[in-house]
Image (cartoon, rainbow, N blue to C red):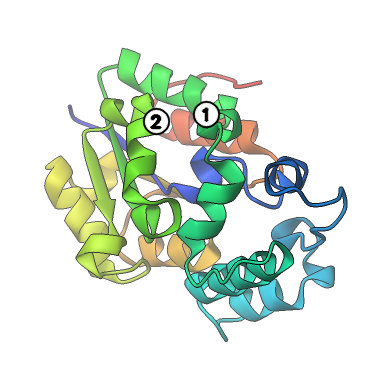
Amino acid sequence: MNRALILDFGGVITRTLFETHALSEAALGLAPGTLTWQGPFAPETDALWREMQAGAITERDYWQARAAEVGRLVGKDWTEMSQFVRAARGADPEAVIRPEFRAAIATVKAAGLGLAILSNELDLFYGADFRDRLPFLADFDVIVDATHTGILKPDPRAYAACLDQLGLPAAACVFVDDQRRNIAGAAAVGLPHVHFDVADPATSYSQALQMLGLSKELC
């Protein structure tokens, strides 16, 4: 392996919780239209999201608040994001995986390149057992999760840990994340990057593949 694709988990691999309100409402027994916060899809209507984007709170703070809010709606005292995710997505986690992601990693694997996940909260948000229900994770050479390392992006050490495990220099990799602060962190350490657009995942993945020298349009 002489090059690698490094992916955030979250909205890069799965459809965001903003995109799957209908599925969440059905799983939780809530009336359609109960969940109205839209994050990056309608930031003007989501004050908490704007606070997070401005750096006033962390992404973990945002989702902990949303988990507590939804928990109250279903009569639960949810203090952890994983409680919300398991209840909303536990029945069929494969249903929220982006098809563009599946196509992209198949292309990378076929070319003999490396695959890595660099996440701030994979197990924290989803629960460690969630991994066992996603067979595609076995295709990844490296998974670095700040749930266990305690080093969150955009700390330079987070990117360095992933690169060290891959055994590759930054210039040989492409990093994909949907949070601007994490993209800025990648830029600061010289790591080529794509700011993932959750509203246009195909274009974002196509750009990443092209940067790796793999020309493929994802529809």
Does residue 178 appear in the picture of this structure? no
- Whether pointer 2 and pointer 1 mark residues with C-beta atoms closer than 8 Å, the reply is yes
Q: Amino acid at mark 2?
A: Leu
In percent of width and height, residue 94 lies at 52, 29
Q: Residue at x 52, y 44 (%)?
A: 12
- Mark 2, secondary structure of its residue: loop
The amino acid type found where label 1 is placed reads Glu
Closer to the camera, 24 or 199? 24
Q: Which residue is mark 2?
A: 134
Q: Is residue 197 visible?
A: yes
Q: Nearer the viewer, residue 29 or 133?
A: 29
Who is closer to the viewer here, 215 or 126? 126
Percent position (x, y) of residue 124? 38, 60
Residue at position x 19%, y 30% from top? 2
Question: How many other residues sit within 10 Å of disc 1, few (<14), some (14-19) or many (≥20)?
Answer: some
- Image coords of residue 3 (percent x, y): 25, 33
